[in-house]
Amino acid sequence: MNHTNRALNRFFLAATGLVLLAAGTLTAGAGMDAGIRDRWSSVSTNLLGGWRNLRGTAPLQEPLGSWWALAVPAVLLLGAAASIMWLARQGGGRTSEAARQRDPELGDTAVDISYLESAVEAALEGNRAVVGSSVSAWRGRGRRRTTTQGLRITLQARRGASPREVADLAEALVTGIEALLGHRTTVLVRIAGGTRTRLAGAHRTS
């Protein structure tokens, strides 16, 4: 959960995967089929000839031989540096810390997410409306480059459970977590169903 565009991420991942798949397919095909190997050799020869012609348009003293031999690595390095800086500025993502309190005299106090997970499991023990739960923490960038932190609680509702009952239970969990932390915090609550919900027995209320 950060400010990285999810659709853009998926597009780049898909494009990278397709490029790698195509390269692997061509490599495997070149090893098994003489026709593909010959065409691949022809394409490689043409590309190499084009690169040599391009080098000749901007000659430079040896050992480089051409300005292009200096410009291409420089552009690649600048692109890599820009990517690293962009990733560093994104920040955020999942974290193992549920909260952190800074005190100049006593030092920093951090609450591990496992502590809240245990507290939620204990609060849900014996409850028939929920068959499972999970708690995670995330950190992101807010406005003016401030760091924001929040929690996500996922409840797997039992098949047939009352939505109102589960919602009230989630609200009680949020109140209890804020009491444990000693301050209000951003909490995303997700009430979901799934395989465990379908396999669990129906919850009947009278």
Image (spheres, rainbow, N blue to C red):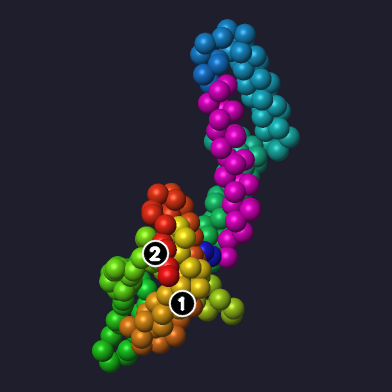
Residue at the image position 34 percent from the left and 69 percent from the top = 127
The percent position of residue 35, horizontal first and vertical second, equals: 62, 8
Task: Classify the position of the C terminus by image quarter.
Answer: bottom left
The percent position of residue 16, horizontal first and vertical second, equals: 58, 40
Say which quarter of the image contains residue 3. bottom right
Q: Nearer the viewer, residue 79 or 155?
A: 155
Residue at the image position 39 percent from the left and 64 percent from the top = 130
Amino acid carrying mark 1 in the image: Asp
Disc 2 target residue: 130
Q: Nearer the viewer, residue 47 or 191?
A: 191
Callout 1: SS: helix
Furthest toward the front, the residue is 206
Disc 1 target residue: 168
Residue at the image position 33 percent from the left and 83 percent from the top = 180
- Magenta span: predominant SS is helix
Residue at the image position 61 percent from the left and 59 percent from the top = 5
